[in-house]
Amino acid sequence: MIQFKNVSKKYTNGHEALKHVSLHIRPGEMAFLTGHSGAGKSTLLKLIIAQERVSRGQVIVTGKELDALSRGQIPHLRRSIGVVFQDAQLLTQQTVFENVALPLLVSGFNYYEIGKSVRAALDMVGLLEKEKYLPLSLSGGEQQRVSIARAIVNRPTLILADEPTGNLDPELSAEIMRLFENLNASGTTMLIASHDLSLIASMHHRVLTLKQGMLINNGKD
Amino acid sequence: MAKTKHKQRRPKTKLNVYFACHMRACFASLGRMVRASFANFITILVIAIALTLPLTFYVATKNVSLVTQDWSSASTQITIYLKADLTRIQTQDVLHELRANTNIANVRYISPTRGLNQFAKVLGSSEITHLLRCNPLPGVVILQPILSLRNPAQLQQLANRLQEMSSVDIAQLDMQWLQRLDGIINLANSAVFILALLLGFGVLLIIGNTIRLATRDEHREIAVFKLVGATNAFIRRPFLYIGIWYGFFSGVIAWVLVSVIIDWLQAPVSSLASSYGGRFILQGLSFDAGLSLVLISMFLGLMGAWITVNRSLKAHY
Ligand SMILES: Nc1ncnc2c1ncn2[C@@H]1O[C@H](COP(=O)(O)OP(=O)(O)OP(=O)(O)O)[C@@H](O)[C@H]1O
Ligand SMILES: [Mg+2]
């Protein structure tokens, strides 16, 4: 599903965020990505959706080598991946409903067809009654849950989550994790960046650890 | 299971999806403009005025060329100076021949005696007729060519033929000032063209700049759209419609403005014309011209939006 082959990422300011990272995550797997702040977790996830490009090495997602994709193919790649961003990345002028509907709208569905899917996704994150709100009138945790609903609404085969529980209390965090486990049980591949080590430890899934841009624990063997 | 559910919801054809996307973008952008009504109204007015300037100029030159067409048909004439030693019979023969010429509409003869009297009248003294022992003036014939013979080459040809008649001393075509006027009008026309080009470019910049300001606020939103897999075409679409709407409203307002200006000028122009004993009705924009104006303006709006939104699309990966 996701394969990194000796990947390095150097930002334009010269900072090397990832160094020689190789990893392989199989279809249907659920894995956590941990590491100190600044270790390169977000960078790794950004490489997977081609938001950033590698400096060296190869990233292969759903069988496609990302560097070989043309600009026109990237939107199609992104539609098959649900992403929960560290900062929720919501449209502030549009309602919760419209935000969650976005992945469906961009792939050509219209508002009449998507009501059911959007409400189902909002229900899963417990925000059904807030569909008409604007994002800025929600709490940080609620905004993050809108972002989660948006990531799962079109039932992608791969979900990437960057600190999805960063703003949530322990109880809600556990609930979101159960949601992720359910999605994974129905076949969705999950990669979740988090530094909530106690939560991760309680879940018995594969854990990859980054330290200063290097993958020091593959979670295998 | 989930997959098949999705398939059912997908609209029947690709074309349908395409059309639906366009309709949504089209009306959503209109809605967005209505919500930010005041700022947009000002922008539309600015564009409309930018359009009105070359348009008014265009209408003005159209009217001037109408006027000069009138003049040229009224005042093109050929003056013939007869040889001085013609007898009365010979003169009559010449006049007869000229009147028989099918290219000539009107013949007016000024005899040497009448010419001298007119000359004396201009000088304000009848003494001169006494001072001169014999009349030095030749007979003069003023001809008006027929209306179908109005182009300079044909007129010149007629004048040359008259020149070759044995009793004609000089045949002279009074057309130079008209040619000059023609030249001036041609110059004005090219000036209008250049001005229209410049102002059209200005309109492009104004619309482009407006869209740029709009997209500056939406910069972050464009990033979000990209991250959930929107194609550039999808993101671009609402902005392009905004550009088209701007163009549409500005074009219509410019059309109205020009019509109002012409209406307003009609009264002074009429009174000016009547003081010269004429009648002149200003020609406004024809429906076709107005329609082209609106279409061109919509096209400019589209281009302006296209250029700017593409620039901000390139900023995101
Ligand atoms: N756009 C960028 N330009 C330059 N340097 C960057 C950029 N984004 C991230 N970095 C640097 O790369 C390093 C890794 O950043 P990254 O966001 O991947 O860390 P992280 O592991 O997600 O941290 P956190 O847990 O705080 O979110 C950091 O040192 C950061 O300063
Ligand atoms: Mg991060």
Image: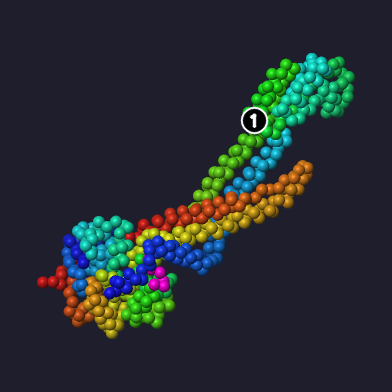
Q: Which quarter of the rendering shows the N terminus of chain B?
A: bottom left
> Going by the picture, which residue comes out furthest to the left?
A221
The crowding category of the residue bearing disc 1, from other C-alpha atoms within 10 Å (few below 14, some 14 to 19, many at least 20), is some
Q: Relative to A181, say whether A44 is above or below.
A: above
State left or right for residue A77 relative to residue A109: left
Q: Relative to A150, say whether A169 is above or below.
A: below
- Whether residue A112 appears in magenta in the rendering, the answer is yes
Give the residue at x 46% y 53%: B303
Question: Total of numbered circles in the picture?
Answer: 1
State left or right for residue A52 relative to residue B84: left
The chain that hosts pointer 1 is B
Q: Which quarter of the rendering shows the C terminus of chain B?
A: bottom left
Residue nearer the viewer, B285 or A146: B285
State left or right for residue B198 relative to residue B127: left
Horizontal and vertical percent position of residue B47: 55, 56
Give the residue at x 74% y 48%: B270
**Pointer 1 residue:** B152
Residue A38 visible, this orientation: no
Give the residue at x 45% y 61%: B239
Horizontal and vertical percent position of residue A159: 27, 71
Q: Range of the magenta residues? A: A108-113
- Whether residue B317 appears in magenta in the rendering, the answer is no
Give the residue at x 37% y 81%: A128
Residue nearer the viewer, B57 or B81: B81
Residue B252 visible, this orientation: yes
Residue nearer the viewer, A74 or B201: A74
The kind of residue on which mark 1 rests is Pro
Residue B156 sits in which quadrant? Answer: top right
Secondary structure state at the residue bearing disc 1: helix
